[in-house]
Image: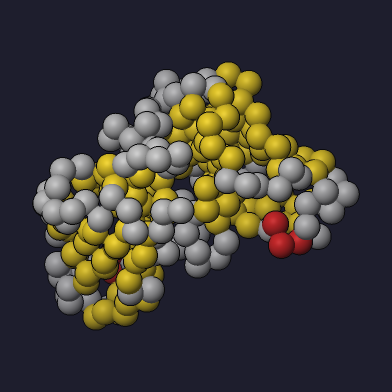
Amino acid sequence: DTEVTQTPKHLVMGMTNKKSLKCEQHMGHRAMYWYKQKAKKPPELMFVYSYEKLSINESVPSRFSPECPNSSLLNLHLHALQPEDSALYLCASSQDPWGRGTEAFFGQGTRLTVV
Amino acid sequence: GQQVMQIPQYQHVQEGEDFTTYCNSSTTLSNIQWYKQRPGGHPVFLIQLVKSGEVKKQKRLTFQFGEAKKNSSLHITATQTTDVGTYFCAGRNAGGTSYGKLTFGQGTILTVHP
């Protein structure tokens, strides 16, 4: 199984809503990532979890709250988002986060629209 | 922080023409990866380069990593319509507080006209 599964595929939420994005991988990867991607832009790193601990937070606003319940799951909790937060949210995983030569496997993404 | 610059931003070619995209990092990289993202899709890993001066080939694709491990290129020979998409380089920091962080270049959007 070389897949990273993200749910939901599409999400429309109001600015007062609370929602969660979910990501799952069963490749035994010990690093998991959240990226945000706007149209015609590169993926922009938000968070990195290494061995289930948050290792990088790229100064992301607190309305985005990541959670790694176990080595296979990664969640992104959303609260009080703004319309400019509308984007494709990509989850990725890799075998080793410390640059020793492992590719990142990306999920299909969740296309989020904030209204 | 680390920056990875990629050019050109857009490239339109006729089918059969060659295509090259270039990446340049502000810092030394431990490795560089290349990804392809089809329209409406997600990034898919193509290759990773680790050694200084490394050259790797995948059929019509040739990847190079510079001697100083700060620049890289992807060359496609005789493009086909299936090559359409955005090509991203992504470099991993070699050290510092963001060790291991993968930073994407801006991407090159390739259009192939039949």
Determine whether B73 is above or below B93 in the image.
below
Q: How is the image coloured?
A: secondary structure
Looking at the rendering, in which quadrant would you find the C terminus of chain A? bottom right
Residue at 26% over, 67% down:
B21
Q: Where is residue A81 in the image (x, y as percent from the top left)?
A: 78, 52
Q: Position of residue B7 (x, y in %)?
A: 32, 71
Front-lying residue, B69 or A25: B69
Front-lying residue, B41 or A98: A98
| Left or right placement of residue A16 versus residue A55 in this view | right
Residue at 37% over, 28% down:
A95
Determine whether A60 is above or below B75 in the image.
above
Residue at 53% over, 31% down:
A55
Front-lying residue, A71 or A3: A71
Residue lying furthest right in this view?
A16
Q: Position of residue B105 (x, y in %)?
A: 39, 60
Residue at 17% over, 77% down:
B17
